[in-house]
Image (cartoon, grey):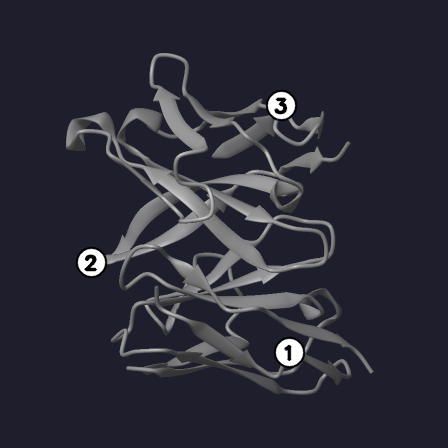
């Protein structure tokens, strides 16, 4: 199984700040990397697929980048609704595996 | 509107069985790959298994912790996905989500629609 490691595990930020979350794969996964957002008490929601493509309806302040083993999710100008937990997930091989999550909370 | 609605969760004793259902609407269910993903209390997301469309043979694939105990099936006539869980353990306690898996870009799949989840508690 491909291990996915996110950092940091949590971070505190203010509305208007920019934040970056990192995801590292245990082996090269090309661009087979998805990002999900999970608000408290809700189901996860697909944000970004294929490392850098924005899902329909997702605001442009979310950007994804990377390939191979190292990936980033960048959120510019945090909004109140962005305080949530973010997960990366590799779709390179089965089983699909998730990172442990990064919780973004309000400073 | 694309919608997935899970049901069937509850409290079950260790060693017991439970069957979860996921009712799908708003898309052609018979063509869809479907997954189950769970989330233990306060923990991250864990993929449990997948069933492909019948036109592709409907093969299933399972995560190691549930292989041999859990069975995923589909009834395309009722647009329903099921998860039969046997020999349940305390570590199976979680919220269980059904998801679609779609080829969102050429060769790239993602879990693009999620249900609201149903809670399974395994405890004596």
Residue A18, placed above or below residue B6: below
Q: Residue furthest top?
A: B77
- Percent across and percent down for residue A22 are 50, 83
Residue B85: x and y in percent read 52, 29
- State if disc 3 and disc 2 touch (CB < 8 Å): no
| Circle 1 residues within 10 Å: few <14, some 14–19, many ≥20 | some
Same chain for the residues under marks 1 and 3 in the image: no
Label 1: chain? Answer: A
Q: Which residue is mark 1?
A: A9
Helix, strand or loop at mark 3: loop
The answer, for residue B1, to whether it is visible in the render is no
Q: Position of residue A54 (x, y in %)?
A: 42, 66
Asked whether, in this view, residue B12 is left or right of residue B49, the answer is: right
Give the labeled residue for mark 2: B107
Residue A105 drawn above or below residue A46: below
Q: To which residue does mark 3 refer?
A: B8
């Amino acid at each position: 199984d491909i291990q996915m490691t996110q950092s940091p595990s949590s971070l505190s930020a203010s509305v208007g700040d920019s934040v970056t979350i990192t995801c590292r794969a245990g082996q090269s996964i090309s661009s087979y990397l998805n990002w999900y957002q999970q608000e408290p008490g809700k189901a996860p929601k697909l944000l970004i697929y294929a490392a850098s493509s924005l899902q329909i309806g997702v605001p442009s302040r979310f950007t994804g980048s990377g390939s191979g083993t190292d990936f980033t999710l960048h959120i510019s100008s945090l909004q109140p609704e962005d305080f949530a937990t973010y997960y990366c997930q590799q779709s390179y091989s089965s089983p699909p595996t998730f990172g442990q999550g990064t919780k973004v909370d309000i400073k | 509107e694309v919608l997935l609605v899970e049901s069937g969760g509850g409290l079950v004793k260790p060693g017991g069985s439970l069957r979860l259902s996921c009712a799908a609407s708003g898309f052609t269910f018979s063509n869809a790959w479907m997954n189950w993903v769970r989330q233990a209390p306060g923990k991250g997301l864990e993929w449990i298994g997948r069933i492909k469309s019948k036109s592709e043979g409907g093969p299933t694939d399972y995560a190691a912790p549930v292989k041999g105990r859990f069975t995923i099936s589909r009834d395309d006539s009722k647009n329903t996905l099921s998860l039969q869980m046997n020999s349940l353990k305390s570590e199976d306690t979680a919220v269980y989500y059904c998801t679609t898996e779609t080829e969102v870009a050429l060769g790239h799949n993602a879990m693009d629609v999620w249900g609201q989840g149903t809670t399974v508690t395994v405890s004596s």
